[in-house]
Image (cartoon, grey):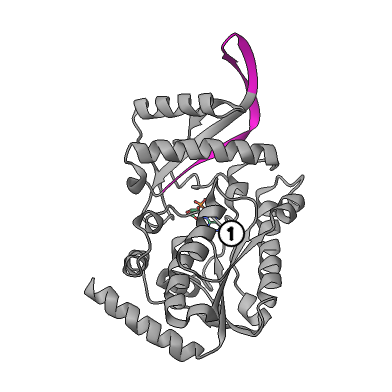
Amino acid sequence: DWTMASYKEEAIRKIREQVGDRKVICGLSGGVDSSVAAVLIHEAIGDQLTCVFVDHGLLRQKEADEVVSMFRDNYNIPLIHADESELFLGALEGVSDPELKRKTIGKLFIDVFQKYANGIDGAEFLAQGTLYPDVIESVSFSGGPSVTIKSHHNVGGLPEKMGLKLVEPLRELFKDEVRALGRELGLPASFIGRHPFPGPGLAIRCPGEITREKLEILRKADAVFIDQIRKHGLYDEIWQAFVAILPVRTVGVMGDGRTYDYACALRAVTSVDGMTADYYPFTHEFLGETATRIINEVKGINRCTYDITSKPPGTIEWE
Ligand code: XMP
């Protein structure tokens, strides 16, 4: 794509001009935006960039390995894998209120990011994958009615607190343009087409108290669901798909025995921007096959439901 090729060159020139020979830190989430920003900045300034990937222990199965191998091994980008799952899961023990979960994770995330960033000697810039819609949204919402449905987790305010200047090379782009830029930078299609994943991660897909046991069960069920969606060629038609593990055990029968295990809910929606969403109209065959696979393959789950709530009145995530 000619336009993106020249956009890329121009963006690289601007980053070099802004940063010079100084150092940049970039928080990597595994999402498309921060990934594209990191690869672009690395092309511009090479190893003056260090990425920090905060692993809060609430990631999907194999997610941390994929991010680390993609950026460190594939792109040779200096990457700190901040494995702080013990810290996060410890702080979340006994917490079941959704807002308290979000606030606990959000605050720790900032502390942890700051701790690792401080360890990078002489860094002067913080890179963020801010997009044009994020820029507009923060303007048009100020002064408007403020109803907080869910407190979102972000690193707003952090640059000032740490005395860092911002590098935001995607500020003029919409999501589809970021994907085009990602392709231009050679990121694999499977990575560019990834569904969004929320900052608080699996915490908000595990209503009630979070335990390591539930997280393990959830990861397995979620992996089966996504595998089913890919096998049926539906991944790219869906905005987001995931499993939520419900805070309830129900009775079932398997072989000659009685089971008493967790129930789960499958969630899959179509959407343009995440603001409104419709549940995805899977066939009954698909749903039946998926439920059978999850119950057979995932120890700890014996009942599977499908969430047919649209947004509004529901939200996409369960918390
Ligand atoms: P809801 O559940 O509010 O989600 O309908 C709308 C979209 O936002 C994502 N989401 C988040 N993303 N930090 C994020 O980065 C968060 O705290 C957060 N909460 C929800 C959600 O996955 C969906 O795409």
Q: Residue at x 44, y 36 (%)?
A: 308
**Range of magenta residues:** 240-260
Q: Amino acid at mark 1?
A: Thr
* Residue 98 spot, x, y in % from top left: 65, 49
- Above or below for 94 versus 103: above
Quarter assignment of residue 36: bottom left
Q: Which residue is mark 1?
A: 148
Q: Residue at x 53, y 73 (%)?
A: 142
Q: Nearer the viewer, residue 192 or 319?
A: 192
Q: Quadrant of the N terminus?
A: bottom left
Q: Residue at x 61, y 59 (%)?
A: 151
Q: Is residue 92 magenta?
A: no
- Above or below for 279 versus 89: above
Q: Nearer the viewer, residue 80 or 87?
A: 80
Q: Nearer the viewer, residue 313 or 42?
A: 42
- Above or below for 154 versus 163: above
Q: Is residue 255 magenta?
A: yes
Quarter assignment of residue 279: top left
